[in-house]
Image: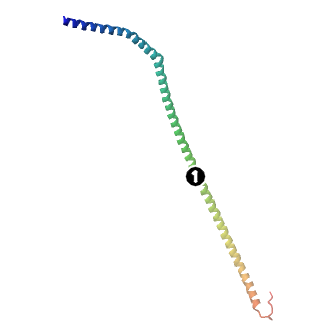
Amino acid sequence: MAANLGFRRHNSISMTILQQLGELFLQAVPIVLILLVFYLVLRTLFFQPLLKVMAEREARTIGAQKAAEAAQAAATEKIKQYQDEQEAARKKFLDERAARLKDARAKAAIFVGEAKERIASEVIAATADLETTITALAAQVARRVLQSTRPPGAPKETR
């Protein structure tokens, strides 16, 4: 009997625990249902729109980054084009300057050559003029020298 009494006591404790667990489960079911409904409401009214907004934001951010990269590439291309045009203009300017310098040097060489020819002809003319006048001047100088060395009473020469 003592074993029977221990079994009943243990059995009654188990039954009490099972009843308490059953009551606890029955009390927890509405809370679980409320939590489930709350989760579904939050998911449809809060999380889905929030995730949708975040996805749109991500797409816009990626789009803005791609647009910025495209603008950067276009700006880089414009800078390269500008530099190429600037280099071409610089080369053209230097070529024109070199052509003008070459033309100016050629004109200066022609001018110098003409001046040398003119000076050479003037030197020849002056030499010829001197040669024609040198004999007359030499005769005149000789007469004056002779006149100045004549004795005081000598007759003057007549021409």
Q: Quadrant of residue 28?
A: top left
From the top left corner, tell me how far across and down residue 74 is, in percent. Answer: 52, 37
Q: Quick one: 158 or 77, which is closer to the camera? A: 77
Expressed as whole percent of the image width and height from the top left, the position of residue 16 reads: 30, 7
- Name the residue rendered at 19%, 6% in the picture: 2
Establish if 34 lies above or below 158: above
Tell me the crowding category of disc 1: few under 14, some 14 to 19, or many 20 or more residues within 10 angstroms, Cα based.
Answer: few
Q: Is residue 97 above or below residue 62?
A: below
- Tell me: residue 157, above or below residue 57: below
Label 1 amino acid? Leu
Label 1: which residue? 94
Q: Is residue 48 left or right of residue 116?
A: left
Left or right: 65, with 136 as reference point: left
Q: Quadrant of the C terminus?
A: bottom right
Which quadrant: the N terminus? top left
Residue at (76% x, 87% y) in the render: 144
